[in-house]
Every structure is written in C-alpha cells, then in structure tokens.
Image (spheres, rainbow, N blue to C red):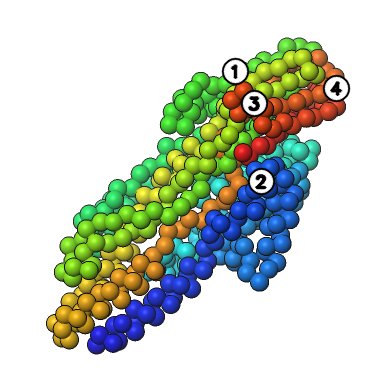
Amino acid sequence: MAAKIILKILSALLLAFMSLSCATSAKAFIDIDSAVEQADFSAALETVVKRQQGKTALYSEKNAIMLYLDKGLLEHYAGNYAESSGDLQNAERMIEEAYTRSISENFFSYIINDNTKEYPGEDFENIYLNVFNALNYYNRGNTEGALVEIRKLSMSSGKLDMLARRYDYKDPKTGASLNDTVRRETGVSQLPETKQVNFSNSALARFLSALFYLNDGNTDAARIEFDQLNGAFNANRKIYHGSVPQAVEDSRNVPDGMARLNIISFTGLSPVKQEEVVAERLPFQHPILQTAFFKLPSLVKRPSQITRIEVVVDGEDSFNMELLEDMGAVIEETFTARYSNILLKTYIRTLIKYVVADVAAVETAKQHGELAGFMVAIAARTAMDVSESADTRMSRYLPDKAYIGGINLDPGTYSVIINYYRGNSIIASDEYRDVVVNTDGLNLLESVKLR
C-alpha cells in the first residue's frame, strides 16, 4: 500500500513540475526592464518580439494576456498607437473570455495551483487598458473612439461599477456569504475572511472623459464627468489622499479667446507580485504534517526616483504637475479583494492535500511501521511543497502614478520642456517643439518616464 501511495505522490510531483513551467521568473525580464527604465521602448519591444521567437518563448500560451498587455503598453509608450490598440483589444477580449473559463481548468487549479490555468488578467489591468487605449485613439485623431474606451469604464454597469460588486458574493438561495457557503459545504470552520474592493471610480478616467467631451463641445457631459472626478476623491480616501488638483478646475474654466494646453505624465512602475510563504499549525496526527506552508502572491512596490515634475513653456512660464491618480494604490486596492479569494482557495487546496497525506501516513505507519509512515509523510510533504506555487503573473509595465498639469495660452505655437526631478537634480527631460495650441481642439501632451 505504501508503495502505491508513494507512486501516486511522485506522479503528482511530476505534474506539479509541468504546471510550474507556465510561470516566468522576474529575472527573465531584466533586459526589457532596463530598456524601459531608460525610456528606450523600441528596444524593449524588439527584445519582447525576439524572445517570443526563441525555442522557449518569454510568454507561454497560458500567459497570452500578459504578452498582449505588456506589448500593448510598450507600443503605446513608443508611439505605435495603432499596434498598441490591437494588442490591448486582444488582451481585453481574452480577459472577457477568461471570466467564463472552463470548469476543467478551475478543477486543476484547486488540486494543484493557479498556474495550471491560463492567466485571466487582473481587475486593474482590465481597467487601465481602456485608459491607454483611449489615449491611443486620441493620438490617432479619433476622439470618438477615445470616448468609447472611457465609457467602458464610466458608464452605468461599466467596469468600474461592476468592480464594486464583483466580490460581494451571495448564495442566490440562502443569501449566505462566500465564506459561509464554503464552511457549510466543506466543514472547514477556520477560513480567512474575504474583503470588498474600495475602488469604484477613477479620477484619471473621469478627467480624460471630461477633456474628450469638452473637445466635442458637450459641456453638460463634461460637467458630469468633472463632478464624478470630485466624487472619486471623496469616496476613495484610501487612494486619493489629497485634494483635487488645481489643474482640474483650471481645465474647465478657460478664459474666452485663450486655449488650454493640458499635459498628462505617467511615472514609475506599478507594484509587481512575488511569492510569500506563510506557515500555519494544523491539527494533524503525523508530526511531519502538523505545520502547513501556504504560498501566496503579494505585491511589492517599485519605488520611483522621480519626486517632482516641472513644465517650462517657451523658456518662460513654468509650473509643477500635480498627482491625479496613484495607480499603484489602485492596483493594491483592487488586488486586495481578489487576494481574499486567492487566500481562501489556497487554504482549502492546501488543507485537502494535508488531510490526504496525513491519512496515508498514519495508515501506512499502522500497517508497515513508523519508518514507512515517516517516508510517506516526507514524500507527501515534498510533493505538496513543489506542487504549490503562488501565481505571480501580471503586467509588468503599467505606470505607478499619473500626474496632470496645464496652462492657459494665447493660440499659437510653443516649445514645451518637461523636466523630471530627483530632489534638486533633473534626471530626465522631454522636449516638444512646435506645439500648436488652438482654441477649437483638445491640446493634450503625454509624457512617460517609468523610472
């Protein structure tokens, strides 16, 4: 009996190794990360394309959403707006399909780990891909297309509205919560509590929407979006700590005969996931199996070097840009709600594995002696440790923060320099020559420094 048990354990071990091959180590992205930090987005794209053509692709088939997200963002930063739209639309379509993924994949993710599934995308990725696709359309001269992308977020029953309700699970028959339902069905009394997401409105999405409406001459719709932006600051204090930027108010009150130059800047890199191991004592009979190890994803910040952004127009007028949205904080908040479900799932999966192993070890010890039971427990523990791995997949190239600024000017042509400071030192600059500022159009510059 012990031999059969060990054979099954080793088979599970082999399957675990196969499942772990779907994940890609952060070390594999070092050369791309370096190019991104230097704002050489073309070089970063070339590396992605080259690495996908090798014998071992950087992004496996199960990580196709990651590929389209990363490539779509890099294409956007490089100014390849049409190509970026294509990639981001592919990512959005696949995220929607993943939401109704097959039962078989969910089954294997419960008995092994989430890396056996195709990567389904994170909620924050599904939100921000529309923001960047809106900017893609704007930069291609299609403000109506830009508004379509923003409406996917802001409209009633849009992505932001659905996000607030997505993790508020209630049993349709009993009204019981997810935790209560799992306790009833599994008999497990000690379960981590799930949390609700506290993010249902994006100031960044609202600001862009208001600008696009103003450009279309729809002042009433723009007013609603500005009001919603103020509402986002009031309703989400965990994300929006300060006051609404003055640039928001200034952008909606442009003096007659003057034109508004709006500037948006994305800085830093968003948090990424890494695996953390949490140990917990469990009441099993065999001493080898009384401490369980849970492998869970956690978010790690990537601190930005940039402390201040200054805009200089025609070498004379200057102003500092203001923080509109801490995208890293949004990512942390939206991930918190899903993390509760991941924790719950990991807890149940690990507990089931340890129950099976404990029964096998104890029964083997009774029939074949303590040494045989010890060997079964060790083999089971090894197999479980290898078969468990946190799902640390996510897009690596979302910005950490979004800043805005602007200035009212006489219609004309200007030079604009955007200086990025670390302390008192300029560490990067973007220079725009011959910037045409008109009264009858949206004058929007975008700058990106992911460092």
- Element at badge 3? strand
Residue 302 position, x and y percent, is 52, 42
Q: What numbered label is drawn on residue 36?
A: 2
- Element at badge 4? strand
Closer to the observer: label 3 or label 4? 3
Amino acid bearing label 3: Ser
Q: Which quadrant of the figure contains the N terminus?
A: bottom left
Q: Which of the two discs, 2 and 4, labels the residue nearer the N terminus? A: 2
| Residue, disc 4 | 413
Closer to the observer: label 1 or label 2? 2
Closer to the observer: label 3 or label 1? 3
Q: Nearer the viewer, residue 413 or 279?
A: 279
Asked if the residue at tag 4 contacts the one at tag 3, i.e. Cβ–Cβ closer than 8 Å, the answer is no
Determine crowd level at label 1: few under 14, some 14-19, many 20+ residues with C-alpha closer than 10 A: few
Q: Which of the two discs, 3 and 4, labels the residue nearer the N terminus? A: 4
Determine crowd level at label 3: few under 14, some 14-19, many 20+ residues with C-alpha closer than 10 A: few
